[in-house]
Image (tube, rainbow, N blue to C red):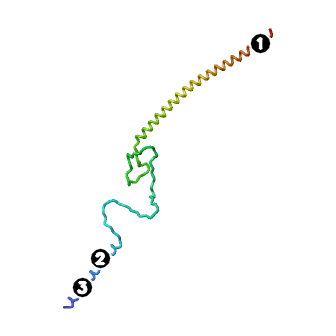
Amino acid sequence: MTQIKRRWWIISLLLVLVLGGAWLGEHLMHEEAESSIPTYPVQQGEFVIELKLKGGELESVEAENIVAPRVRGQLKIVELFPEGEQATVGDLLVQFEQTDFQKRVMDDEQQVESSKADLEKTLATHKAEIAKLEAEIANEEANLRLAELKIERMAFEATVQKEE
């Protein structure tokens, strides 16, 4: 082989070795970087957060406790704020069936009106009774005055008869 061919072979061999080493180094570094980061294949579905606790309590930082009003009977929900949505001040969270309660309010209003009418009737009756009793008192006072006048007249007549 001639000197030029040999040099050409050596340069080609060195070039192949350098390129192969560079490729192998890149491949090893990339594989090492991938293995240090935990990965998981992505798929569409429900996002579930699971916490495993040993004792204690877990509470939301911005949670607000909402309690249904205490009423007799069953509460029926007719409208509910969508679960998972962000609520703001003034949003309607729960709408309960109001038919039974509206009937109770109407019944109570009628009862109040009836009681007011009874009161007015009783007051009118008592006013008439009071007027009658006041008239009786005035009559008795007049009778008393008459009796007093008769006593005075008798005393006067007795004095007049003595003088005669």
Residue at the right extreme of this rendering:
163
Q: Identify residue type, mark 1.
A: Ala
Front position among marks 3 and 1: 1
Count neighbours of disc 2 (C-alpha within 10 A) and say few if under 14, some if 14 to 19, many if 20 or more: few
Q: Identify residue type, mark 3.
A: Leu
- Residue 8 percent across, percent down from the top left: 22, 86
Determine the CA span between mark 3 and mark 2: 21 Å
Which quadrant holds the C terminus? top right
Q: In the visual, does 62 lie left or right of 125?
A: left
- Residue 2 percent across, percent down from the top left: 19, 91
Q: Identify residue type, mark 2.
A: His
Front position among marks 3 and 2: 2
- Residue 96 percent across, percent down from the top left: 40, 45
Q: Name the residue rendered at 46%, 35% in the picture.
A: 109
| Tag 2 near tag 1, CB within 8 Å | no
Q: Which type of secondary structure does the marked residue at label 2 adopt?
A: helix
Which quadrant holds the N terminus? bottom left
Residue at the front extreme of this rendering:
73
Q: Which mark is residue 44?
A: none
Determine the CA span between mark 2 and mark 1: 153 Å
Q: Which mark is residue 27?
A: 2
Q: Which type of secondary structure does the marked residue at label 1 adopt?
A: helix
Which residue was labeled with disc 1?
158
Q: In the visual, does 81 lie left or right of 152?
A: left
Q: Which mark is residue 13?
A: 3
Of callouts 3 and 2, the N-terminal one: 3
| Tag 3 near tag 2, CB within 8 Å | no
Q: Is residue 26 above or below residue 164?
A: below
Of callouts 2 and 1, the N-terminal one: 2
Q: Name the residue rendered at 78%, 10% in the picture.
A: 161
Of callouts 3 and 1, the N-terminal one: 3
